[in-house]
Image (cartoon, rainbow, N blue to C red):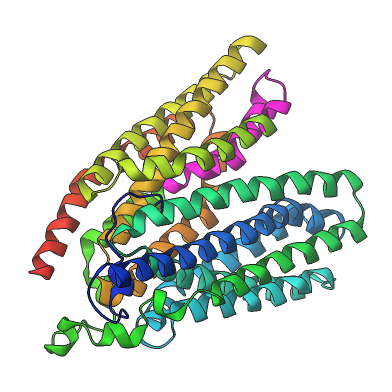
Amino acid sequence: MTSTDLTAPTPHPSTTHILAGPGPAPARASAAGDRSAERRVLASSMVGNAGYGLLSTITVLYYSDFLHLSATRIGLTLTLAGLAAALLGVPIGRLADTRIPARIGAGVSYLLLAAAESLLTVVRSFALLVVVLTVSAGFQMLARTMRQVTVAGIGGERAAEFRAKVSARANLAMLAGMGASSLVIAYDSPTVYRAAIAAACLCTAGQGLLILAVPAEAVPGPAARDASPATAAGTAPSRWLVFSDLPYMAICGLYATMAMAECVTTVALPLWISQHTQAPTWLIGAFGITNVLTVGLLLTRAGRLIDTPRKAGRAMAVGGALNGVFLLLVMLASGRSVAGAVVLLAAGVVAGVAAELCVMPAENELTMTLAPARVRGQYLGLSETALTAALTLGPSVVTLATVDAGRAGWIVLAGVFALAGAAAPAAAARAGRRRAAEDE
């Protein structure tokens, strides 16, 4: 998943309809309003992701050490909750298109998510944990989908670039939360863990309040989209138009496949380093920090370079090849000396980070640009569904394919990533032709 630091003086299409008249004064007002909305969305993302970085790092340990749940039960619960939430993406997006202003939906959903996650501090049984995590996952999907529609509305014609900037700032904020989590883990006290969970929930609530503070006129609501020329001419889309857009669905599927590379970085790589190489285990943390920091610093710049669907398709192809190289280098680190393993792992991580800097802005460009404005919620809901499903199933898939299957599994998965990337340019071209035909 884009930057607002652009030199183009043109006011956003999402806000020009509220201006009182022609001339430079309204344009300046529009630009000022847009900058205010953008700043609030950026701030909300940073606050929320600082809390997410804290919460996502400590909760599994909290469930295991203080709720005394087995790894199997924890994994099953997280998987079921994630898959249940994934089913909600498109219906939620349709609500943003037809009923609920996206910024209201996102803000309220983050407040409800904070309330639901705060219950983790009082849960003491497995059954209640399943309920809390499933409800939380649903609110998270609701909030994320509505937020993407909000970002698209504020970004206007440069929505993909703005989304990349939001993601970059979120990455940097998440790093701060991950750093705070190390202190929580060091104290290893249930009271400290619960206090940290409460702090993360406050961050989530703050995220919701900041999104609610976005000016209403900055994000076109359902009423504005209902007044579009297509609707007025009697050519309004079907209830579930996104499911008839096979090229767009293909793009979502390809990106979901490539998004599993994140699970390689967070799950398979640490296990492989600790169990199958001679490399020091402190590299696990160093590689994680390097990944988050580098992506946070460079993603906005990468988003500026990938500014058309054609470029995005090519970038995904390059990203797929780089992910393949990443996996092969990590695989080859097994059985090497300490120095050899470190060199191969470091080179692999560099390739993986480069792949992420290709794939993330490419996905932003494709999913944002190729989504029709009048049904943008449906389309972005589908992209969120695909991503959530990939990241939910990804840990199990990559663990089986790499750590359990060994070298052959690494090679097969590397090939899958490379092939998914290679298919992206053609998929992007087909989706672009379909969108151009619909716009005529």
Classify residue 320 as left or right of residue 408: left
Q: Is residue 280 magenta?
A: yes
Hey, which quadrant is residue 125 in on the image? Answer: bottom right
Q: Is residue 394 magenta?
A: no
Front residue of 285 and 104: 104
Q: Give coordinates of residue 388: x percent, y percent.
A: 49, 60
Check the image and report above or below for 335 versus 77. Answer: above
Query: Camera-side residue: 347 or 227?
Result: 227
Above or below residue 115? Residue 403 is above
- In percent of width and height, residue 408 lies at 46, 29
Instruction: Determine the residue positioned at 29% across, 76% down.
Output: 375
Q: Residue at x 65, y 34 (%)?
A: 270
Q: Residue 187: image x %, image y %?
A: 91, 47
Q: Could one spot residue 408 in this view of the protein?
A: no
Q: Is residue 276 above or below residue 291?
A: above
Magenta stretch, residue numbers: 258-284
Instruction: Tell me if 333 is positioned left or right of 312 in this view.
Output: right
- Residue 102 image offset from top left, x and y in percent: 45, 77
Helix, strand or loop for the magenta stretch, by majority: helix
Work out which quarter of the rendered image holds the C terminus and state it: bottom left
